[in-house]
Image (cartoon, rainbow, N blue to C red):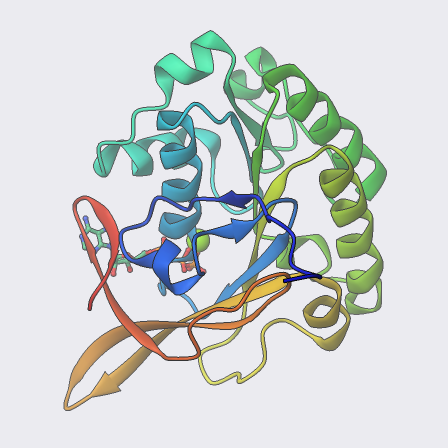
Amino acid sequence: MWGVIDLKRVKTGIPGMDEILGGGIPERNVVLLSGGPGTGKSIFSQQFIYKGLEMGESGVYVTLEEHPLQVKKNMENFGWNVQEYESSGSFAIVDAFTAGIGSYAEKEKYVVKDPDDVRELVDVLRRAVSDTGAKRVVIDSVTTLYLTKPVAARNVVFQLKKVLAGLGCTSIFVSQVSVAERGFGGPGVEHGVDGIIRLDLDEVDGELRRSLIVWKMRGTAHSMKRHPFKITDKGIEIES
Ligand SMILES: Nc1ncnc2c1ncn2[C@@H]1O[C@H](COP(=O)(O)OP(=O)(O)OP(=O)(O)O)[C@@H](O)[C@H]1O
Ligand SMILES: [Mg+2]
């Protein structure tokens, strides 16, 4: 059939997720991973990075919300030890959290002092991706980048997307929304990204239930259903 190209896909490695996506995230896509507090966005992103490392695909994790040490500790809770990958140079954390203050940051290679300065972020990110040869990039969260200036959101996302797609990366941009919000992070952002995956927590009969839905994914057909999932000590698993 004409018009159909053999699209390369990046496997999330999250049990059940690649089936939902028709095989994985189309290569070079920027996916907005949107959801309220505690819905599993960081865990999903960390699993995406770690499974990539296991499959031989380098990764970069940009942290704006948590201390880099906390990110690594959190990953270890799920058995995702990034130490050897960091030492061998296939994984790097970009620290956009500590602002370069403290003994930890002094030793770090990739520090963004002012996350409001997109150019600085792009420079450090470019360096980290180039040093590691990263195929996968996570920014947790992009919301933090334009919290104080919502009008800049579209531009920030566009600049990051241009750089990352140009470098051949497949990326997850974490987007924080409030508990009752129906959107995914604002119109400028939602239209600019290639895909949107929404994570939800809903109270049913006095119990919180987790589910996710793929709202859009350029370049592929995907499940249109809402899928319940669980978080265990092995990470996220889609329930069938
Ligand atoms: N070992 C575990 N087993 C089961 N559930 C866990 C485990 N560890 C964490 N969780 C669940 O995951 C939630 C945190 O997920 P995560 O940090 O990915 O949320 P988030 O969407 O990034 O939230 P935020 O926007 O606040 O950063 C916890 O609130 C808890 O419900
Ligand atoms: Mg988080």
Would residue 70 be seen by someone viewing this image from the given angle? no
Please tell me which residue is depicted at 75% across the width and 64% down the height of the picture.
Answer: 192
Q: Position of residue 125 (x, y in %)?
A: 70, 30
Q: Nearer the viewer, residue 79 or 2?
A: 2
129 with respect to 141 (left or right): right
Q: Position of residue 146 (x, y in %)?
A: 73, 59
- In terms of image quarters, where does ligand 1 lie? bottom left
130 with respect to 82 (left or right): right
Please tell me which residue is depicted at 58% across the width and 73% down the height of the picture.
Answer: 184
Please tell me which residue is depicted at 80% across the width and 63% down the height of the picture.
Answer: 154
Would residue 140 be seen by someone viewing this image from the given angle? yes
Q: Quadrant of the C terminus?
A: bottom left
Classify residue 202 by image quadrant: bottom left
50 with respect to 137 (left or right): left
| Relative vertical location of residue 150 with respect to residue 155 in this rendering, above or below | below
Q: Position of residue 17 (x, y in %)?
A: 35, 57
Classify residue 51 by image quadrant: top left
